[in-house]
Amino acid sequence: MQHLAWRKDVAHHLAEWVTLLGDVPRHRLTEADVLAARDRWRLRKLAPKTINHRCDTLRNLYHRLDGRQAKTPCDGLTPLRVPKTIIRRVEEQLILDVDRRL
């Protein structure tokens, strides 16, 4: 059984594609359409990881509907670079204090 939050994410990502592209038939979407969508979302300051997830969701939709070997408008795209998360060290005592309070 798939996780409910994952399904909501997929539904949201697909809704964002529909909002942006309207009722353009799926077979007419091009790599240029996807690049334009990515640029638009970047201007809206969406995180690169979120944009990559949206593209992955679109790619997965094509594969789900047309088979794993199906061509998609996302095939030639390089994922956006996602900045590394800075590791913040936490003192052992803080961890123990939090654990004790739980």
Image (spheres, rainbow, N blue to C red):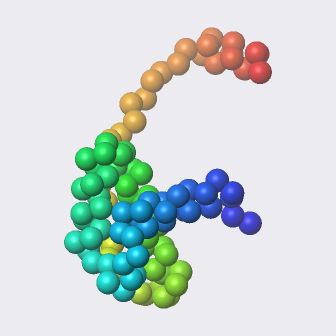
Quarter that holds the C terminus: top right
| The quarter of the displayed image where residue 16 is located | bottom left
Left or right placement of residue 40 versus residue 89 in this view: left
Left or right placement of residue 101 versus residue 60 in this view: right
Q: Residue furthest front?
A: 23
Identify the residue shown where x is 25% and y is 47%: 43
Residue 81 visible in rendering: no
Quarter that holds the N terminus: bottom right
Q: Nearer the viewer, residue 5 or 37?
A: 37
Could you tell me residue 38's position as x and y percent? 29, 58
Rendered position, 11 above or below 43:
below
Residue 84 visible in rendering: yes
Could you tell me residue 18's position as x and y percent? 43, 67
| The quarter of the displayed image where residue 74 is located | bottom left
Identify the residue shown where x is 31% and y is 42%: 45
Left or right placement of residue 12 versus residue 56 in this view: right
Rendered position, 87 above or below 68:
above
Identify the residue shown where x is 56% and y is 62%: 11
Q: How many marks?
A: 0
| The quarter of the displayed image where residue 8 is located | bottom right
Q: Nearer the viewer, residue 54 or 15?
A: 15
Left or right placement of residue 92 versus residue 89 in this view: right
Could you tell me residue 24's position as x and y percent? 36, 78
Rendered position, 2 above or below 62:
above
Identify the residue shown where x is 48% and y is 88%: 66
Could you tell me residue 23's position as x and y percent? 41, 76
